[in-house]
Image (cartoon, rainbow, N blue to C red):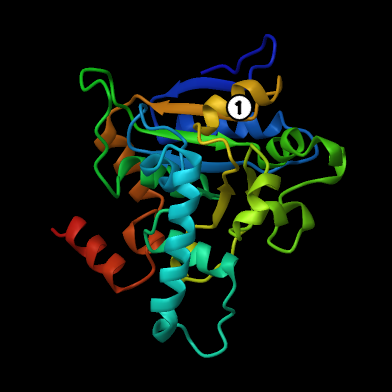
Amino acid sequence: MPLHTGEPLPIEHRTVESAAGLVELVTEIRRGLTDSRPLWYRGHQCSAFTLTPSLYRENPEFDDAIQRERRLITRFRQRSLPFWPAGYPQTDWEHLFAMQHNGVPTRLLDWSENLFVALYFALHPTHTHQPENPEAPCHPVVWCLDPVGWNRAVLREYAEEVAILTTGDPELEKYRPELETRLLARPQTGVAIYGTHNSQRIVAQRGTFTIAGKNVQPMETICNALSNETLLWRIEICGDKPSVTFDLSTIGVTESMVYPDLPGLALELRSQEW
C-alpha cells in the first residue's frame, strides 16, 4: 500500500496482505527516515490492543501503579536471589528487565529490532486478548517505532544530541524505579531504551524497550500530542493468516528461533509434526 504523501501525521495506519507486502512497506518507511535511523517493531494479535505496558494496563492510576512497582521490585529482589548466577549485578534496572522477561508487570514495553520477530508474535499470540468490541475486526498488527525521533520529541532540550538511551545515560536517571522522593521529577512521557540482554530469548528476539513515564495513556494516544512528525506506524495484516504464517516459517522464523531453548524446540516439533 502506498505511503502517506501529504502532511506528516504522528501515527500512520497501513494495511498489507502478506509477509512480502509487510517487508516492502517497512523498507519504504525506513528509507524515508533521516540519519539512517533504525526502526523498532512490536507485534499484537489484535488491532484493538494498545501500546500500554502491563503495569499500567493492570493499574490505570499512576500512584497505584508506582506503589505496586515498588512492592514487586522489593519482593522480586528478596525472592529471586537463589536463582541468580554468582556475580550477577543486583540493580533496580537489572531486576526490572528480568521481571519483564519473566512476566511480572512493569513499565517496560517490549520491542524488537527484527521485523520478523514482531510478525511472529502478531501471528502467534502468547496470551488471549479480549477486545472491547467483540464484533469489531481483529487483525494481527505490527507496530513500527522511530525510537530516535521519539526520544528527540520527548527530550527536546537535548535536540539532535539524544538518540536511544541506555541505563548509564543521565537522561534516563529520572525514569529509574526508585524511592518516592524522585517521583516528582519523573517525566510525563516515556522513552526508548536499550536493555540488558540477560537471557537467550532476548538475544534471539533482538529485544529493546520503551519505559513509560507518569502518563499512563497508551503510546499511540501520547504520540498524537507529542509531535507533528510521524513516529509510529500501525500496520494491519489483513491477508489470510495461515498463509502469512506459512510464509514466515518458510523463511525460517519458527518457534526455536524465537525461543532458543528446549521449550521452544518442543513447541516447534509439535507445530511441525507430520
Residue 246 x %, y %: 30, 43
Q: Residue at x 60, y 18 (%)?
A: 3
Residue 175 x %, y %: 65, 52
Residue nearest the observer in this picture, 23 or 160? 160
Residue 215 x %, y %: 57, 35
Badge 1 element: helix
Q: Residue at x 50, y 50 (%)?
A: 66
Residue 224 falls left or right of residue 135: right
Q: Is residue 18 above or below residue 114?
A: above
Asked which quadrant contains residue 93, the reply is bottom right
Q: Is residue 60 visible?
A: yes
Q: Is residue 204 visible?
A: no
Q: Which residue position is annotated with label 1? A: 223
Residue 34 falls left or right of residue 85: right
Residue 120 falls left or right of residue 89: left
Q: Is residue 71 above or below residue 42?
A: below
Q: Residue furthest left?
A: 274
Residue nearest the observer in this picture, 61 or 28? 61
The three-letter amino acid code for the residue at tag 1 is Cys
Q: Residue furthest top?
A: 6
